[in-house]
Amino acid sequence: MRILTVGAGGVGGYFGARLAEKGEDVTFLVREKKKKKLIEQGLRVNSIHGDIQLTPSLITSNDKATPFDLVIFTTKAYHLDQAIQDVRPFIDDQTLILPLLNGVAHYETLDKAFGENVIGGLCFIESAIDSTGAIRQTSQAHRLVYGSRSNRQRDRIEQLQAHLSGTKADFLFSTTIEQEIWHKYLFITVASGITTLFRSSIGPIISSEEGRTFIRRLLTECVTIMKAEEASLSPTIIADHMRTFESVNDNMKSSMLRDMEQGSTTEAHHLQGYLMERAAIHGIEVPTLSTVYTNVSLYEASLT
């Protein structure tokens, strides 16, 4: 199976490197500048689960290649449209599309571009490119979850399982992928919302009664919107996520907060903004979510 990973950053570079380490045929689609750097330095992963140093197979959008069997999208939401255009020459009607983006809004865009070839996917990982250009992965979680979104995809995904399993990362097939996507969307929307609003890691927020109350209010508002969207959610999801917040590393920061600290664009419109739009359509009042989104929107406005 020929696998194309769109990007070689903290997510695509890590999971692609783990698959290549196993012996899978993995190629990374990158920009010319990134390609030059990877040719000079190789693809390096520094991880608590074991380091990797490899000479990656690389292409850019200007190169020629036959269609791939699997394309893994790992870009930020605001780069999705460009990424779709970049991969079109490398896709045919048999190519499976596995998105690892946060949220749910991107599925409409990808379905429009690639139809029923788009399967469900998400990942849990803390990783980033460090000052030397290496991928640094620091947490126990390095999990990629995937599954079918229609009956027509099931046979093809069963064939995919053999190629994604057996690596030094957790590639897990799920029969409830739609629910898992919504559950992660809920968690990351709240986690990024509270950490950016309070400019703090999780620990100091969850350790105060006021912080826990704020988290629960935000969870409740987001769940109300998602239920109006007929999302598949566990009946105990709020209690489950509260326990998760209480158990995570006190120093954990959301990637959105790290983006803000670096003066970068965020995915706020794709995460909190999408839920704000759906709340307006359903006539749902969401004062807590509105406060969170206003905070990040003012930050985004300051970048222009």
Image (cartoon, grey):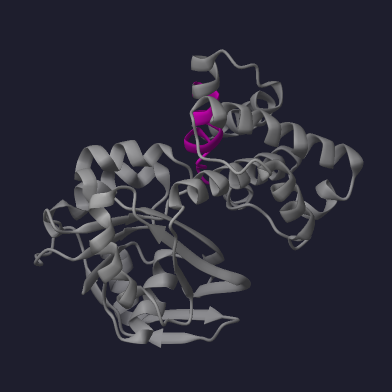
Q: Nearer the viewer, residue 74 or 133?
A: 74
Q: Is residue 235 magenta?
A: no
Q: Is 205 left or right of 113, judged from the image as shown? A: right
The foreground one among 33 and 283 is 283
Residue at the (34%, 48%) spot, across then down: 149
Q: Where does residue 5 sit, x and y in percent of width and height?
A: 31, 65
Q: Residue at x 63, y 26 (%)?
A: 294
What are the residue bounds of the magenta stretch? 263-277
Q: Quadrant of residue 61?
A: bottom left
Q: Is residue 154 above or below residue 133?
A: above
In the rendered image, residue 90, in percent from the top left (x then y), is placed at 14, 59
* Residue 31 appearing in the image: no
In this view, which residue lies farthest toward the right? 209
Query: Furthest residue to the top?
Result: 283
Q: Main secondary structure of the magenta part?
A: helix
Q: Residue at x 28, y 50 (%)?
A: 151
Residue that appears at 22% across and 46% down? 116
Task: Indicate left or right for 255 with 241 as reference.
Answer: left
The percent position of residue 103, horizontal first and vertical second, equals: 48, 43
